[in-house]
Image: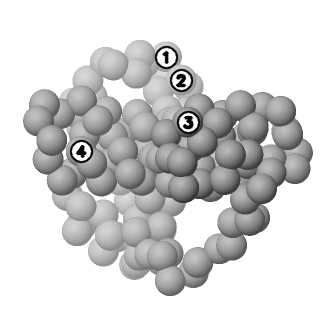
Amino acid sequence: MVELVGKLTNWYIRRSRRRFWKSGDDEDKMSAYTTLYRVLVTFVKTLAPVLPFVSESIYRNLVALADDSEPQSVHLCDMPQADSSLRDAGLESKMKLAMKAVNLGRSLRNRHELKTRQPLQRLFLLPPHDEGRVEVAEVS
């Protein structure tokens, strides 16, 4: 649970700030909000047996007050089931590579006492496997 919250806040929300703050009502902005809403509601439903009061409060604020067609309590909802058809293995692989590269970059900066916001003159990313090299080439 802690790992999911970390990935959601540090990777999805932080990386999607521009999408959330766009002016106007475009499709990309709504897609970002819809994804975040779906993740939060599913997470709260999954969390309900472990943290019943906290999950109930979050659910009521997110869902019950906004949508009369949904159950009024998180404890009346079905437990979410995984839908493997929604997974994108290629995207997951690219994100793992990106996260690893960022974490390695941060550790190198810490080791050499370089501030995070200090620009680097050059950076070389050399993934150990051919698949990683192809994914890096696609992104850059």
Disc 1 and disc 3 in contact, CB within 8 angstroms: no
Residue 60, by quadrant, is: top right
Residue 47 at x, y = what percent?
77, 48
- Relative vertical location of residue 115 with respect to residue 39 in this rendering, above or below: above
Instruction: Give whichever of 138, 61 is nearer the camera.
Output: 61
Under circle 1, the secondary element is: loop
Residue 12, by quadrant, is: top left
Residue at 49% in and 40% down? 66
Q: Earlier in the sequence, mark 1 or mark 3?
A: 3
What crowding class fits label 4: few (fewer than 14 Cα within 10 Å), some (14-19), or many (20 or more)? some
Residue 90 at x, y = what percent?
41, 75
Q: Is residue 15 left or right of residue 26?
A: right
The residue labelled by disc 1 is 113
Disc 3 and disc 2 in contact, CB within 8 angstroms: no
Disc 4 and disc 1 in contact, CB within 8 angstroms: no
* Badge 2 amino acid: Asn
Residue 13 at x, y = what percent?
43, 37
Under circle 2, the secondary element is: helix
Q: CA distance from mark 3 to mark 2?
A: 45 Å
Name the residue furthest front. Answer: 68
What crowding class fits label 3: few (fewer than 14 Cα within 10 Å), some (14-19), or many (20 or more)? few
The residue labelled by disc 4 is 29
Residue 65, numbered circle: 3
Residue 110, numbered circle: 2
Query: Between tags 3 and 4, which lies in front?
Result: 3
* Badge 3 amino acid: Leu
* Badge 4 amino acid: Lys
Q: Is residue 55 left or right of residue 62?
A: right
Query: Between tags 1 and 3, which lies in front?
Result: 3
